[in-house]
Amino acid sequence: MKNHSNDHQFNIDKFYKNYLKGPRIFNNRDALESSYIPEELPHRDIQIKDIAEKTACALLGDTPPSFLCYGMTGTGKTATIRYVSQKLAQQCSELKPWWVYINCNIVSTPYRILAHIYNTISREEKIPPTGLPKDIIFKKLLGLLDSKVGNSICFLVLDEIDILVNKKGGNEILYDLTRLNENLDKCKTSLIGISNKLKFKENLDPRILSSLGEEHIVFPSYNASELRDILNNRAKITFHEGVLKEDVIPLCAAFAAKEHGDARKALQLLRKAGELAERSQNKIISSKYVEKAQADLENDYIIEYIRGIPLQAQIILTTIYLISKFSPEHIIISGDIYEIHSEIKRLIPNIRQLTKRRISDYINELTLAGIISAEVKSMGHYGRTKIIKLDIEIKLLESVLSEIEKIKGILNYKPILLQSDKVKLKDNIFKKLI
Ligand SMILES: Nc1ncnc2c1ncn2[C@@H]1O[C@H](COP(=O)(O)OP(=O)(O)OP(=O)(O)O)[C@@H](O)[C@H]1O
Ligand SMILES: [Mg+2]
């Protein structure tokens, strides 16, 4: 007979009842969503003014110049463009400009870009996801722009334009888009490119660069004090009064300022801290929740990063994992990684031997990402060598590695190197040297 007792089970009905009875922290949770456009954008006055000046002639039916916006991630590029587009629309009684927003990371092929522009303007899924020749869609698009947009301006916003430039056919489609106006009778288009890679201009066809304007709008990273202003504004809308302890916003701002001043990161921290407080039925958000939120977000980043690196880099991390697990005292040098890599690669199908140089490159990449640290030390007659340390929790590393099909089977394998006495000797000598 099955035991139907609910003693040890999660009681979902009770949970919801308690939740409703619990303290209310959020007044408007959506205000921390990435799609939310705030009423004000503190510290973006210069950029707002610049974009407003460039686009104002659309109010008179003239064609604004095309331009580019640059800045690191989370510096408010997308938010500012969306904000200005709303304000511009509010000023127009007739001839409202059209805005087609294209995220080149999502709409990523030349064909799909044309189809997306067409379908957005026609407000129907008229162009199929594949199949039509490019020149046919182009003709259809020109016809639609003239008939539907008519005498208005159509802004084409290419967000994450750097991704498009590095793709096959990317330069070509951009060139075609910069030339749209030459083939239109009534409607006029204007391109706005947004990028967080400053160097992408190097791969841009000079003809496109000249049409996009040599001039660009720069979005500098925020400092901690600017981030505090942004967070204070947003917190007023998001939370009920009195739920935030005084040190919460400064701490969120400080964490985000350390990471190049990313407003998205600052808002994520605030949101997560609120959710953690809510989950533990606390009606006050204190700095301990911010610290926990920071650790959680960092772990999420680490997990995503490790999942995304090439298998060989994951195997290198596995060698470091195995050493740390079976010989926690062991001083790891790059030679050890090389040796254990040669040994365990035989346990994984189709894995090539790596050169010492290649291993060293991977070690550098993992160091830059903050997963490990490597310090060059002089080791007497062993010469100069890199001492490697794992910088993340071994449990976290284990849980990510155990998700990887080709690696999960070797996580309990003790490498021969770690079984020999020679290693103990080496370790003792090294300990004296460092
Ligand atoms: N000055 C600001 N005032 C209020 N909120 C801001 C400001 N700058 C950015 N934000 C908010 O921070 C988040 C990130 O901004 P946004 O998406 O515009 O960054 P981005 O520069 O486009 O980044 P990416 O290059 O990653 O696309 C958004 O939620 C946005 O509302
Ligand atoms: Mg953006």
Image (cartoon, rainbow, N blue to C red):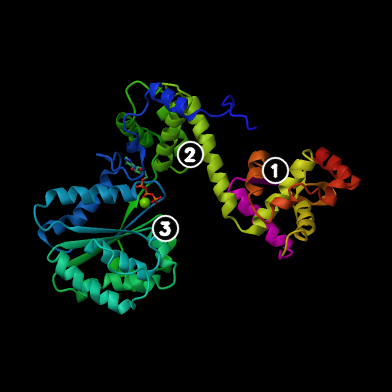
Asked if marks 3 and 1 touch (Cβ < 8 Å), the reply is: no
The label shown at residue 389 is 1
**Secondary structure at numbered mark 2:** helix
**Secondary structure at numbered mark 1:** strand
Q: CA distance from mark 3 to mark 1?
A: 33 Å
In this rendering, the label closer to the viewer, 3 or 1? 1
Give the quarter of the image for residue 203.
bottom left
Of the residues under marks 3 and 1, which one precedes in the sequence? 3
Residue type at tag 2:
Lys
Asked if the magenta segment contains residue 366, the reply would be yes
**Secondary structure at numbered mark 3:** helix
- Residue occupying image coordinates x 64% and y 58%: 311
The label shown at residue 258 is 2
User: What stretch of residues is rendered in magenta?
Assistant: 350-377
**Residue 415 x, y percent position in the rendering:** 81, 50
Instruction: Please count the marks in the image.
Output: 3
> Does 423 appear above or below 216?
above
Q: Which residue is mark 3?
A: 198
